[in-house]
Structures are given as structure tokens and as C-alpha cells.
Image (tube, helix red, strand yellow):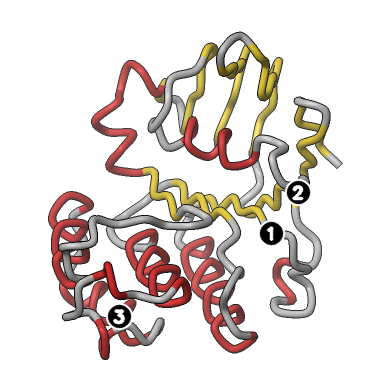
Amino acid sequence: MLQIEGYHKAYHGQTILRIPAVTFDQPRTWIKGGNGAGKSTLFKSLAALIPFEGTITLNGKEMRKHLQHWRSVVNYAEAEPIFPAFLTGEDLIRWYQQTKRGTPEQVNKLIDTLGVRKYMHQKVGGYSSGMAKKLSLVLAFIGCPELILLDEPLATLDVEAQAIILALTDEYVQQGVQVILTSHQGLAAVSEQWQYVHTCLIADKNLTQL
């Protein structure tokens, strides 16, 4: 269960997003909102990548008090991933496997499921946006996460790949993992399990549960 209290994020004195209190207690949550609404800002806060005011708690552990643990159990895939151009996909996967404690069997399954094996030995500086997206999604599922954050995971992917991603989320949900994603695209046509889910809207610098 994810709880947010007194959250406030501002840049240069301008409020980007304010959330007095919200609890995410469902296995799947879909966060909607227009471009620039603050969805990515919220996800980066949840992933402990940027500073913010307020407290965020996951399964009874507050982020700032358990930061190392938090980063080991919260996985995040950005909407437009950017990786060091000189590294290969294999380099990144190996590093994530070590830091997230993923098993070789798990990693190999993800590599094959998302079809990245054919280019994982190439430097990511030469990746297309779709290739980088698939690599970021492989990384997001490595290890034993308690929470997976997927920012626009379906963007740049074809329908078949979209279905694979949502099927993967279902596998992890069945293992007790909480999944929160954003998407401008409809989910029901791709996954029946995402047809009726906890839905929130970020608009006017606030988050509302629908």
C-alpha cells in the first residue's frame, strides 16, 4: 500500500503539484492527465529521484527513513528514457540485475519476452526510441519490486508489444506487486485486467481519485 501525505512540489517558487493525502491500496492504478500536468514529476518523486515536501510511505516504510530499501523495491521506467550513450543494453541490464538482485532466469525471460536480445550488445546511443523504451521496461521488471512505476509504457510500442507489457504487469500483480502507470492510450482494448482499475486524474496541480 502506497500512502502520500502533505506532498508539494514546486520549481522556482511555482507549484507543480500538491497532494494533501491519498492512499493507493489497489494492485493496479492508472493515472491520467494532460502533458505537463505533473505525472512524471510525481513518478520521479515516488522513485526518490527528486526532492519534495511531504511524506511517502510504502508498506509501512517511509521513504526518507528507509531510502536504500526504497530504491531496491521501487522500480521506475521513464516516459522518454535516456541512458549513457557509451553503455550497451547488456551493461545496463547487468548493473540492474546486481543492484536489484534479479536472477539470471528472470532477466533472460524478460530479455526474450520484450525482444531486446538482438540489440542488447549495441551501445544505447544508437538505439531508436522504441528500442530504448523496451530496454527501460526490461529494467523496470528486474528484481523483487514492491512497486513498479511505468510512465507512458505503451508509447512508441506496437499493439503486440503493448499487450506483452500489460500481461507482464498482470504477472507481477499476481505476485503481490503494486503497479501504477500513466497512459494517454486506452488500456481496456489491450488488457481486460486493466479495464476496471483504480483511476486518478492529475489536473490543475492536484490529484483526484475518479
Q: Is residue 172 left or right of residue 158?
A: left
Vertical placement of residue 156 versus 182, above or below: below
- Work out how far the residue at label 1 is from the one at label 3, CA to CA, in angstroms: 23 Å
Residue at point 43%, 20% (across, down): 51
Quarter of the image with the N terminus is top right
Q: Which residue is mark 1?
A: 183
Q: Are marks 1 and 2 in contact (CB under 8 Å)?
A: yes
Count every numbered label the image shows and give the total: 3
Quadrant for the C terminus in the image: top right
Looking at marks 1 and 2 on the same chain, the residue that comes earlier in the sequence is marked by 2
The answer to whether 142 appears left or right of 60 in the picture is left
Q: Pinpoint residue 57: horizontal percent, then vertical percent.
A: 49, 25
Q: Quadrant of residue 135?
A: bottom left
Question: Crowding near pointer 1: few (<14 within 10 Å), some, many (20+)?
Answer: some
| Disc 2 secondary structure class | strand
Q: Which residue is mark 3?
A: 111
Q: Amino acid at mark 1?
A: Ser
In this rendering, is residue 120 above or below 142? below
Q: Residue at x 39, y 23 (%)?
A: 63
For the residues labelled 2 and 3, the Cα–Cα distance comes to 29 Å
Q: Residue at x 47, y 64 (%)?
A: 172
Left or right of 150 on screen, residue 5: right
Three-letter code, disc 3: Ile
Residue 86 in picture, x, y percent from top left:
16, 63
Q: Nearer the viewer, mark 1 or mark 3?
A: 1
Q: Pinpoint residue 111: horizontal percent, then vertical percent.
A: 30, 80
Residue at the (53%, 39%) spot, across then down:
43
Asked if disc 2 and disc 3 are in contact, CB closer than 8 Å, the reply is no
User: On the picture, is 87 further left or further right than 107?
Assistant: left
Label 3 secondary element: helix
User: For the residue labelled by badge 1, is the local secondary structure a helix, a strand or a loop?
Assistant: loop
Q: CA distance from mark 1 to mark 2?
A: 7 Å
